[in-house]
């Protein structure tokens, strides 16, 4: 029996049968996978065959906070959602902060597994162990903020915490997300998985405390972490006051802020209009996740023109890139409005923005014409057209219906050579950083188990110059395979499994992250952990996800880049001349697979799987 | 030999110490000048507050919370402060920034 950090129960809800049951959180599961993404990937692997239709009733959606969530560990209110992704066909995993993650713990659960499909629109209410299935027919069609308010009113509890979908998820838009307050479990189309199950929302309320095994040791371990946060040059005062838009100023200067569907660079110079100063001019307040002293999230109000008066939490750096940079739109008020619109419709700002940038380039090149766009003049920079197209995507109208499934499928439907301009890896649209000027960051995009996902193995060494485990030259290739393994494994376990905000890893704990997690885990749960065992959990999750993806049909050939990355050097700025050729990618892949103990085809070897205790995965791989 | 024409840009708070606005400076230096020489010119131009932000109290060692990129590459991977400048070079002065 688990003694601390965990609530000891996992809730399994079956929408088809309208039943639920509680299962014990196994000690071995906690030791091998810790929680969060680890729990999610493990349950997905064990219970969802890799060839499952992502939008069929056999897919499962697993929500899992970590053992740190709801404790005194700062910045630990994070929850992973895991399912087979309808956008990529690979493991779909997304994380969010806010207050919902800890509320699920307070309600008594270490994870929530959702199975089956409700006959009619439904929402699930969970209150301290009581589960009820409620009609959501009156909620179907609502936008996310209205949906959440209506549920709070119906439950007569304004402090209920909710995850829900908007019109996009209802229509199985493959770039639909799950919204949690004004935050998002954003990527990989998990909102469509909820929609496919006729599940509009999950509402949670709890009053229980997360137990602590050894309070004195926990206090001591926590003080090391808070001490490192206080000493951080990056966290205070700068990050807490300006948030993620600072990275726009940084990446523009480095020449790796992608613009105009990756045809331009940071030297397009939107810094003055989209960077820190511009964002500060729209800022009216800050938001904190539960038990976060930093409060990086900025509340902004559009001030001018037809967008005046629209408020949003954000836009974060990635959304400024996708809705501003890649669309060539330098009107911050338009980006604020689009960010809010995506949240209300329940659509991933990143994939949606990249899809619009893609369509804009096709229009500029004459591959799409006015007859395809419903009369929209889809030039780069047309902010009004972006607002229209976002609505069309969510409601599956016209060109929006095609873009709603992401750029990979859209390019297949549009044809005419459009694949060349579809910026995705494994079907997931590219995040902001132009990886031609950051090679390990690029290798992570190519090999992340979720597709082009910056957060699965962020190369802070290259982007932020943090010399841990060692300083690296962002333009060099040698050593990037080994580094990427380290980045993926350490980030996976310390942030995605434990759980903890990744910004704390980057800005306060890079050199002590696995030690910090080991010490906190030991004190909190009583389970013995060394830093090496902690890191092995990250490796285990990455290997298990890799096997799932292999069984789902992915191979070395999918660990690649869009053609533009490999053939078009950056034309200007401080990364001028950089690209990653196919040959250089292959060199990095060979090194990465070797560091991982995988075959040259990128398949985990029997020896590697056995060393990680993944005999079950080996059996599925070699039946 | 011809004089070197180089540029420098400070990001975020470093930009404010370099005159605000875009935080950019265009400078002319003698041939053979190094990154350290460029910093000295910048400090002379923008004042001692910039010097205190760039160097430790001894005035010799760079502060830890500072990145210097020459044409986008960390000077650590060049020849550090002794890296010789070429005509058209661009130096980026970057504080600890992260997130995103």
Image: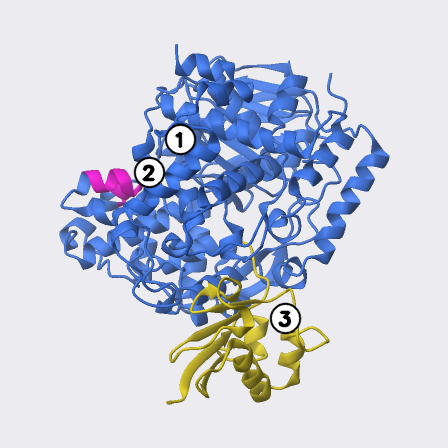
Chain colours: A blue, B yellow
Report the chain holding disc 2: A
Q: Secondary structure at mark 2?
A: loop
Rounded to the nearest whole Å, what is the CA distance between mark 3 and mark 1?
47 Å
Residue at 65% across, 42% down: A513
Q: Depth check: A169 or A354 in front?
A: A354
Is residue B29 found left or right of B13 in the rendered image?
left
Q: Is residue A119 visible?
A: yes
Is residue A350 found left or right of A71 in the rendered image?
left
Rounded to the nearest whole Å, what is the CA distance between mark 1 and mark 2?
10 Å
Is residue A250 found left or right of A234 in the rendered image?
left
Give the image location of residue A517, x and y in percent: 68, 37
Give the image location of residue A63, x and y in percent: 55, 29
> Marks 1 and 2: CB-CB under 8 Å?
yes
Number of numbered tags placed on the structure image: 3
Q: Toward which corner of the image does residue B40 lie, by quadrant? A: bottom right
Query: What's drawn in magenta, residue-wise?
Result: A400-412
Quadrant housing the N terminus of chain A: top right
Q: Secondary structure at mark 1?
A: loop
Give the image location of residue A588, x and y in percent: 39, 43
Report the chain holding disc 3: B
Quadrant housing the C terminus of chain A: top left
Mark 2 crowd level (few <14, some 14–19, many ≥20, 10 Å Cα): many
Residue at 52% across, 18% down: A610
Magenta stretch mostly in which secondary structure? helix
Q: Depth check: A213 or A458 in front?
A: A458
**Which residue is tagged 1?**
A85
Compared with residue A54, is residue A349 higher up or lower down, i.e. above or below? below
Task: Nearest to the eye among marks 1 and 2: give it.
Answer: 2
**Which residue is tagged 3?**
B62
**Which residue is tagged 2?**
A427
Can marks 2 and 3 be said to lie on one chain? no
């Amino acid at each position: 029996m688990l003694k601390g950090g965990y609530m000891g129960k996992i809730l399994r809800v079956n929408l088809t049968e309208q039943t639920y049951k509680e299962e014990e959180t196994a000690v071995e599961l906690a030791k091998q996978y810790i929680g969060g993404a680890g729990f999610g990937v493990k349950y997905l692997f064990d219970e969802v065959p890799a060839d499952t239709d992502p939008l069929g009733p056999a897919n499962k959606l697993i929500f899992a906070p970590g053992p740190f969530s709801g404790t005194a560990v700062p910045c630990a209110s994070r929850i992973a959602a895991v399912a087979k992704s309808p956008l990529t066909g690979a493991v779909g995993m997304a994380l969010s902060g806010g207050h919902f993650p800890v509320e699920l713990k307070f309600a008594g659960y270490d994870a929530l597994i959702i199975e089956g499909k409700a006959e009619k629109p439904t929402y699930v209410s969970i209150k301290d162990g009581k589960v009820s299935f409620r009609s959501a027919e009156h909620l179907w069609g609502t936008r996310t903020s209205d949906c959440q308010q209506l549920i709070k009113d119906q439950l007569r509890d304004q402090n209920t915490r909710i995850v829900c979908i908007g019109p996009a998820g209802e229509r199985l838009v493959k770039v639909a997300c799950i919204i949690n307050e004004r935050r998002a479990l954003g990527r990989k189309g998990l909102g469509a998985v909820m929609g496919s199950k006729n599940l509009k929302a999950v509402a949670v309320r709890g009053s229980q405390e997360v137990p602590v095994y050894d309070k004195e040791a926990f206090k001591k371990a926590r003080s090391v972490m808070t001490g490192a946060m206080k000493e951080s040059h990056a966290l205070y005062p700068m990050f807490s006051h300006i948030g993620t838009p600072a990275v726009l100023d940084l990446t523009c200067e480095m020449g790796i802020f992608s613009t105009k569907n990756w045809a331009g660079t940071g030297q397009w110079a939107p810094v003055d209009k989209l960077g820190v100063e511009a964002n500060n001019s729209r800022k009216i307040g800050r938001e904190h996740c539960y038990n976060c002293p930093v409060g990086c999230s900025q509340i902004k109000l559009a001030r001018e023109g037809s967008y005046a008066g629209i408020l949003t939490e954000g836009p974060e750096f990635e959304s400024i890139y996708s809705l501003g940079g890649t669309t060539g739109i330098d009107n911050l008020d338009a980006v604020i409005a689009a960010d809010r619109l995506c949240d209300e419709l329940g659509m991933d700002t990143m994939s949606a923005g990249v899809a619009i940038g893609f369509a804009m380039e096709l229009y500029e090149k004459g591959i799409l014409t006015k007859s395809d766009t419903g009369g929209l003049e889809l030039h780069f920079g047309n902010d009004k057209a972006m607002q229209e197209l976002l609505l069309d995507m969510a409601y599956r109208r016209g060109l929006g219906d095609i873009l709603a499934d992401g750029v990979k499928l859209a390019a297949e439907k549009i044809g005419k050579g459009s694949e060349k301009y579809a910026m995705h890896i494994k079907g997931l649209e590219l995040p902001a950083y132009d990886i031609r000027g950051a090679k390990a960051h690029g290798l992570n995009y190519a090999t992340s188990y979720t597709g082009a996902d910056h957060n699965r193995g962020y190369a802070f060494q290259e982007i932020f110059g943090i010399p841990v485990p060692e300083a690296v030259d962002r333009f060099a290739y040698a050593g990037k395979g080994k580094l990427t393994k380290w980045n993926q494994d350490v980030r996976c376990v310390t942030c995605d499994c434990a759980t903890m905000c990744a910004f704390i890893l980057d800005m306060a704990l890079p050199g002590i992250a696995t030690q910090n997690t080991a010490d906190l885990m030991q004190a909190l749960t009583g389970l013995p952990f060394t830093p090496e065992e902690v890191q092995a959990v990250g490796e285990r999750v990455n290997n298990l996800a890799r096997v799932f993806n292999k069984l789902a049909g992915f191979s070395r050939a999918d660990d690649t880049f869009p053609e533009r990355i490999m053939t078009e050097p950056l034309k200007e700025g401080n990364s001028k001349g950089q690209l990653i050729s196919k040959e250089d990618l292959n060199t990095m892949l060979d090194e990465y697979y070797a560091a991982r103990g995988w075959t040259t085809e990128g398949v985990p070897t029997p020896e590697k799987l056995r060393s990680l205790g993944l005999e079950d995965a080996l059996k599925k791989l070699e039946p | 030999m011809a004089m070197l024409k180089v540029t420098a840009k400070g990001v975020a708070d470093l930009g404010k110490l370099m005159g605000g606005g875009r935080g950019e400076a265009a400078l002319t230096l003698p041939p053979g000048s190094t990154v350290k020489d460029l910093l000295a010119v910048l400090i002379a131009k923008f004042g001692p507050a910039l010097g205190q932000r760039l160097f430790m109290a001894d005035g010799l060692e760079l502060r830890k919370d500072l990145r210097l990129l020459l044409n986008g590459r960390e000077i650590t991977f060049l020849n550090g402060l002794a890296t010789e400048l070429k005509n058209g070079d661009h130096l980026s002065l970057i504080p600890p920034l992260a997130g995103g």
